Image (cartoon, helix red, strand yellow):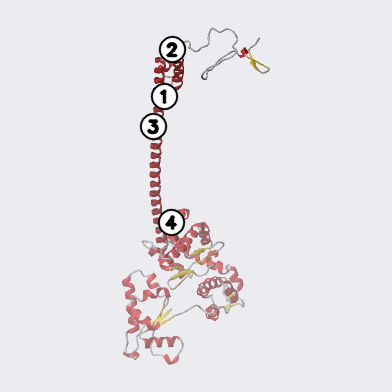
Amino acid sequence: MASGLGSPSEQTSIQGRLSGDSAAETPTSLVIVVDQFEELFTLCRGRQERAVFVEALMALATERGETRGGLPTALVVLGVRADFYDRCLTYPGLAASLQHGHVTLGPMSDAQLREAITSPAREAGLEVEAGLVEVLLRDIGLVPGLTTGSEISRAGALPLLSHALLSTWQHRENATLTVAGYRLTGGISGAVAATAERAYASLPSDQQEVTRRILLQLVHVGEDRETSHRTHRAHLLEDGPTRAVAEDVLEVFIRARLLTVEAGHVELAHEILLHAWPRFRKWIDDDRAGLRTRQLLIEMAEAWDKESHDKGLLYRGTRLTATREWAADPAHRATLNPVAQAFLNASTGHEAAERKKERRRSRGLRQLLVGLAILLALALIATGVALWQRQAAITAEREAQSRQMAAQSSALLDSDPDLASVLAAQAHRTSTTKEATASVYAASALLLRHRLAGHTGAVASVAGSSAVTVSVPDEAFRPRQGGLAPPG
């Protein structure tokens, strides 16, 4: 983006002179062009020094002299990157000039890219071999006439051409830039790799580690290939003492035209850097799993933020555990944007709350189980006691019955020995009390009154008025025709 300082009429005069409009000629004797004006903010750390420089430019653009017909001392033209536009607006004089005097420069067209290759060489007295332009455009991935969907490639085309042309000039043949010389450089890949390694080697060791962190954030790791990942500049700058270091690293790689900046976002100038620079390739291969973890975390965090922090999208279980282990490294955590950090914190807090709830649930379940076990034990004890008491009552009852029958047997020994014997036997069967045992011994010593004794002959028949049990020898009767008859 280019901008002229001064009033709108003066800026119109500047634009006319820059476009070659003779009607816009003025007697102004001095034109000051400040290219890469963004370095005022990247290389100059003192605010006061920056303010003095801006005031000096504004004075040149606004002071008028009588000898110049009332025109300012100089026409001041600034060339500044679009991502530094907001910083220019912090100076009132610049803000007023930028409202009317800015010119936006977009990506180059096919014709402009060809002119960017041939015109500087022609002005330097060099020739460009036929076919070199086509080879260069092909290697950077631009097809002549293609415009739709190619804005990103065209934005990074000029830096790639710059790398390639510089290396080709170093391998020129006399005053000719040749395809063979270009091939000797390794093509676009070799030129980019050499430029990247020089930029990296120019940094002190502390900034080299920050370089690794920043560049890896600009990579999107897919299933089978890697691509450039457009990232907001603010997300690449870690808050704290390393922020200034990160800004220095960014500027080194932007000035080396390895990174491009647009609308506050940073990306690789071309994806060829992912494969052409061996050091960068090794970084990606060594940390592929970590890059994938970070990438998935950021994607899920963005979805979570878009869905108004839906708890159903939070990480849980093994995924959360693996992500937390990765983020435990401060260097890894520093690569997360605020949304991703909030998502990870929310996931951790949610899991902690769920675990606490689960512990309470488990503790309540354990208490319930202990209570049930105690109740069951008490019930079993009560059942056992009841059974014991019932058995004891039955035993006591049987003992009482046994003693009662034993007493009755003892009372009938003299008057009715037969009944006394029966009662003694029944008392002993009911319960073997001492009384029952004694009554059995007493009854066994008596002769039964109704015992048929003194008969030695054969028994022909037995008759009685009630049921009587008679014991006779087996041979007392034998079968004969018409019934039983005694033997002989």
Q: CA distance from mark 2 to mark 1?
A: 21 Å
Residue 392 pos. (x, y %):
39, 27
The answer to whether marks 3 and 2 mark residues whose Cβ atoms lie closer than 8 Å is: no
Compared with residue 63, is residue 251 higher up or lower down, i.e. above or below? above
Q: Nearer the viewer, mark 3 or mark 1?
A: 1
Q: Secondary structure at mark 2?
A: helix
- Which residue is disc 1 drawn over? 398
- Of residues 203 and 249, the one nearer the viewer is 249
Q: CA distance from mark 3 to mark 1?
A: 20 Å
Would residue 48 be found to the left or right of residue 386 on screen? left
Local packing at callout 4 (Cα closer than 10 Å; few below 14, some 14-19, many 20+) is many
Q: Nearer the viewer, mark 3 or mark 4?
A: 3
Callout 4 amino acid = Ala
Q: CA distance from mark 4 to mark 1?
A: 82 Å
- Which residue is disc 2 drawn over? 442
- Which residue is disc 4 drawn over? 327
Local packing at callout 2 (Cα closer than 10 Å; few below 14, some 14-19, many 20+) is some
Question: Which badge, 4 or 2, is on the more N-terminal residue?
Answer: 4
Residue 434 pos. (x, y %):
41, 17
The quadrant holding residue 44 is bottom left
- Which residue is disc 3 drawn over? 385
